[in-house]
Every structure is written in C-alpha cells, then in structure tokens.
Amino acid sequence: MTTHIPLAERLRPKVLSDVVGQQHLLGEGMALRLALESGQPHSCILWGPPGTGKTTIARLMANAFDAQFIAISAVLGGIKDIREAVDRAQQCQHRHTLVFVDEVHRFNKSQQDAFLPHVESGLFTFIGATTENPSFEVNSALLSRATVYVLQALGDEDLRQIMAVAQAQQAFPAIENVAIDRLVAHADGDARRLLNTLETLAVAATQEKRTDIKDDWLIKVLGERMRRYDKGGEQFYDTISALHKSVRGSDPDAALYWLVRMLDGGADPRYLARRLIRMASEDIGLADLRALRLALDAAEVYERLGTPEGELALAECVVYLAIAPKSNAVYKAFNEARAFVKTDSTRPVPMHLRNAPTQLMKDLNYGKGYRYAHDEEGGFAAGERYLPDGMAEPDFYRPVERGLEIKIAEKLRKLKAQNQAAVTSNRRGVD
C-alpha cells in the first residue's frame, strides 16, 4: 500500500532559491541567509504564524551544514524523545547533528532545560519552531543561547506564486481568477493551508469530473470561510491591543475592523464587553460620563440577546468610545496614588477626620473640629484639610482640557482658590 504524501510536503522547497517569502531573512545579505552561507551552524528559534516555512528552513539548514536532522514534535514528544535525540547525536560524532523541535512552546520548563547542557557542549545545534512569542513561552536560559528569527505571514503575491508552482507541477483543473483570489484570502498567509485546500478541491473536482474550478463551486466546497485565529495566543493579544489602541486613537473605522476580526475569529463577546468597560474607565474616564454607562449597557444587551444580535450593541459601544473625548487622568491618578501608598509609611488619620461612635472616643477628641461641608457656604468647607498631617499635597488627579474634565478643572481651580483664601485669612487672624 502506497502512503499518500500531502501536496504541501511534496512541494516543500529542497533548495534555498525555491523558498517563497521571508526575504527579510533569506534575501541577499540578510541575516539568516548569511548564517546558512557561513557553514557555521548556530542554535536559533524560528517564530512565526503557521505555514510560513519554519520546518522548511530548519531542513534547509541541516542540508546546508550537511548535518544529521532529528525532528521532535513537542505536541507528541517528551523527555524520552529528547534522550533518544541525545543518544543519536552521541552515536554520530563524525557528523554534526541538528535537533529540530516543532511547537517548542509546548514543552514545559524541565523539558526545555534538558537541551541546555547539550547545546552548551556543542553536541548538537538546537532549532525550535513556535507560533507563540518566545519571550513568554521559551525558557530564558534556552532563549539566551539561541538567535530568534521572526517569520512573517506570507503575502498575497507569495501565495499566488505558490499556487502557480503547484499548478505547474500537478494536474489541477483550471481555476478562475475570482476563485484564486478567494483561495488566497482563505489561506490567510498560510502556505500549508493553501496547498491543503487546493488538494481537497482537486479531489472534489475529480470526483465531480469538473474541468475547471469556479468561485460559486469553491464557496460551496469550502463552506463558511474561517480566518486563522489563535484564541489564546500571541495573535489574540496583538488583536485586542490593536482594538484598544484604535479606540484610544479615536478611529472608529479601525476599532470596528478589529472588533469584527475578533468576533469573526471566535473571540468570546463577553471578553470583548469586559475590555470595552476597561477602555471606558481607562481612556475616557470623566471626560464623558456616558461612556462607562454605555459600555455596561452593551455588556448587558449582549447577555440578553447573545450572538449575533447582541454583537451590534458592542459595535455601537466601540464606535462611541472611539469618538468620545479621551482622558486617562483618573487612571494615572489612581496608579500614582497606589504607587505612593505602597512606598509611604502608614500615616495616622488626623483626629478631626476620625470616627467617634462612643463617648470615650469623643473624650479623646476623635472627630473634634471637623467641619460638616453641607453646613458651609456653597457646601464647601474652605480651608479644611483631609490629608494626613505633614503630608504634602500630592496632586494625583490632573484633569485634561477635554470633554467634561474641562468643567471639572475649572471647579477644582475655583475650590483651590477658596482654600488658599481661607488659609491666608486664618493666618492673618492668628497674627
């Protein structure tokens, strides 16, 4: 029985010149190409989205260095596989060994640590491939001994070039241009996904005895298009960061785009609702008091209606937050106050601010001299002090000149002037 070799594997480049994309690494004079041409192997981490050539580059490095190639899948492997790789490397001392670990972020700390002594001794060269940020997923000790190369999702032209190679080498039905565009969009930067889809279409076309592939038939075969999206990984956090920054930057179109990208990719709308509430507090604050209420309402509407109806409320909220006046004054004030308290001593509460529920406390002067603001002119006890004794005015909250905080700033300036006038008057009275 002949084992079927997937199209993506059959078309895997055998020489460097056949690699499509990643020219920022493999182009003339670029870092990884120079490393390959040097003849000196070095440990590295290949970080990039799926289907961008990480395994291909690792195999090309083994060929370039005429090295024994040992591949380990961190999804299926463990310490036993690492030990076997070490044994094989020790048995092949006459030839350099390159150990390739796919999805290296799946290995835990002890498993990653198992490579360290052998990398340091030069027994083998370590190459890890990961779709996750190595800063978070690869041990710092191993990371410090490896060069990180960042691969990029393939562009549309790269994918079209790969399709042309596939069509030239395989007997595929003719594909109309609109269908090619849809295939490229469906692949979403992933060459393996493109070739696997192309192979599936070719089989389906053969079964139906089709001589061409048209867009309407393609849609029927593919079903609903799903974009590449990692709900819990690097791409997830990059996308929510883009959404938050688009809202902060007052760009409603960009904010809507990233919101829909996340919903389309399967992000939990409840999580998005929580992030919108955070944006309303952090980036709008008191500049527009309606923003927080609208975010809370949007979250409640989604809870009542669910998907897809409730998602419209999230979209309305995103647009409102994007166009609302921005202020992070309260956010900054809170962080400054928290940092101050964390490093400051535990200052006692001034006597006039203390609670006095018992006669003993009153006899000890708890609450003595406190001025009830409602009984003062304008509801403000001018000159009264509410901070601990000896503590300078910290000036945590500094309202911005946007939205409602313009009026808040005016009010604070007026109250400050009243305080200063009262203090000056008291000093004159004492004198």
Image (cartoon, rainbow, N blue to C red):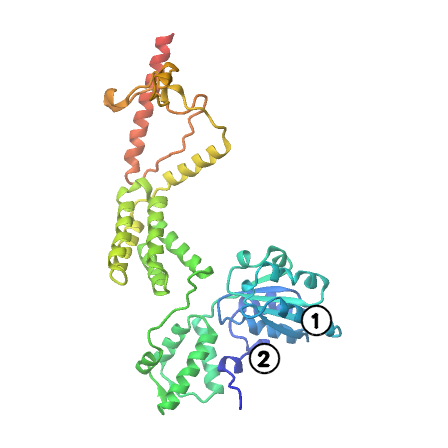
At horizontal 58% and vertical 64% (from top left) the residue drawn is 45
Can the viewer see residue 25 in this picture? Answer: yes
Up-down relation of residue 295 to residue 173 (above or below): above
Frontmost residue, 101 versus 146: 101
At horizontal 59% and vertical 57% (from top left) the residue drawn is 139
At horizontal 38% and vertical 72% (from top left) the residue drawn is 185
**Is 35 left or right of 229, judged from the image as shown?**
right
The residue wearing badge 1 is 87
Q: Position of residue 347 (x, y in %)?
A: 46, 25
Q: Position of residue 234 (x, y in %)?
A: 47, 60
Position of the C terminus, as image quadrant, is top left
Q: Secondary structure at mark 1?
A: helix
The residue wearing badge 2 is 14
Marks 2 & 1, CB-CB < 8 Å contact: no
Crowdedness of circle 1 by 10 Å Cα count: few (<14), some, many (20+)?
A: few
Q: Amino acid at mark 2?
A: Lys
Label 2 to label 1, Cα distance in Å? Answer: 27 Å
